[in-house]
Each structure stands twice: as C-alpha cells, then as structure tokens.
Image: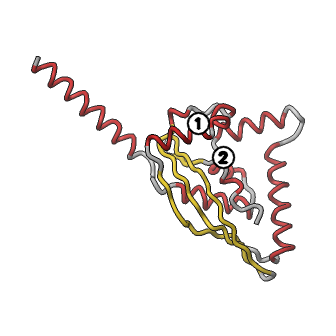
Amino acid sequence: MMALTALLALCACTAGEKIKDDALKYDPEGYKTLLDNALKLTANFDRKLLDKVSHPNETEYYINYYKEKDQDYIDLLKNEFNGIGEDYAERYGDDWKLSYTVDSVEEKDAEGIENYKKFDSYYFKTYNINTDDIQAVTFVKVTVHIEGSLGSNDKQKTIQCFCIGGEWYSFYAIRLGIKL
C-alpha cells in the first residue's frame, strides 16, 4: 500500500512538473510582438508579417477559399491594405504613422480559456485549430493612435490573443490598424 501511495505521489509530481514545463514554453507577453506585427502589416503589407499575426490554418483556409473563386487571397489582402494606406495618406498626410499603447491586459485563467474557446468556436472549427493546444489566452485593450501632418486620431480596441505552441495569434489583430 505504501508503495502504491509513493507511486501515485511520484506520478502526480511528474504530471505537475510536466504542466509547469509546458507553461514555461511561451512568453506571457508574446502578444506584444503580435500587436507590433499587426500594425506593421497595416503600414506595409507583407506575407511574412501576415504569418506572424494569423494562425497558419486561418491563412490556408482563405487561400483555398479564394482559389476556388479564381482569386489570390494574398493579393486581395495586399490591395486592401494598400487602399487603407492611401486613405490614411489623404486623411492624415503622407507621413502617417501608427502606434498603440496597452491600456489593460487580462490574462485568462482555465475557466476564461474555456469560455474563450466557446466564444470563438466558429473560427477554431472553421480553421481546424485544435483548442486543446491553446496554452494561454489574453485580452488586450489598446489605444491605437494614428498621426500625420494633416491630423491624428485615437481609437480603443480589444484584441483577444491566444497562444499555441509558444506562438501568439489572434483572429482580430489583423484589423488593429484599420478603421481609424
């Protein structure tokens, strides 16, 4: 009986260490890089930046979706972001720049992560993303600031970020720098 108790204690300890090890495999503030890349994407669309903002399954889904319509998803996005840049140049000046400040960060606990999985279940299912792989979820409230020689504007946004395999993604970050 003592041997069984010792074995169970060892298994519990090992499982606890495994969970702790998994939790250390991501940067809890990695969402900042995600947000930085999202703003860079608005200012200068680049496929490599897109891959750092959107989950690969999401990008692949849209590439296939638009291929069926004989359109190129990456070209469509590039044209859309170029149009946004032209609009900003007209409204704020050719020298427009984007920045953001973090107003608040809400790291979700286990219950919050489960609620988020349900909230965005449509996207996870559509893009075939396994929600069991989610390591962390953080809601980040930011103020996005645009400024140029013709004016400036601020807009608050909340971006839901999730971490899988040590990488941070968001279904919403791609929109961080738009509609200002």
* Residue under the point 74% across and 64% down: 43
| Element class at badge 2 | loop
* Residue under the point 83% across and 48% down: 75
Query: Is 111 displayed left or right of 178 in the figure?
Result: left
Would you identify the image quadrant in which residue 143 lies?
A: bottom right
Q: Nearer the viewer, residue 30 or 51?
A: 30
Residue kind at label 1, given as amino acid type: Lys
The residue mark sitting in front, 2 or 1, is: 1
In the displayed structure, would residue 39 be above or below residue 114?
Answer: below
In the picture, the disc for residue 129 is none
Residue kind at label 2, given as amino acid type: Phe
- Pointer 1 residue: 118
In the displayed structure, would residue 136 be above or below residue 99?
Answer: above
Residue density around tag 1, few if under 14, some if 14–19, many if 20 or more, within 10 Å: few
Q: Nearer the viewer, residue 98 or 101?
A: 101
* Residue under the point 55% across and 67% down: 103
Q: Nearer the viewer, residue 111 or 96?
A: 111
Query: Is 12 displayed left or right of 170 in the figure?
Result: left
| Element class at badge 1 | helix
* Residue under the point 14% across and 25% down: 6
Q: Nearer the viewer, residue 38 or 140?
A: 140
In the displayed structure, would residue 155 be above or below residue 9?
Answer: below
- Whole-number angstrom distance, CA of label 2 to CA of label 1: 14 Å
Where is residue 77? Give x, y as percent: 80, 50
Where is residue 108? Give x, y as percent: 47, 48
- Pointer 2 residue: 171
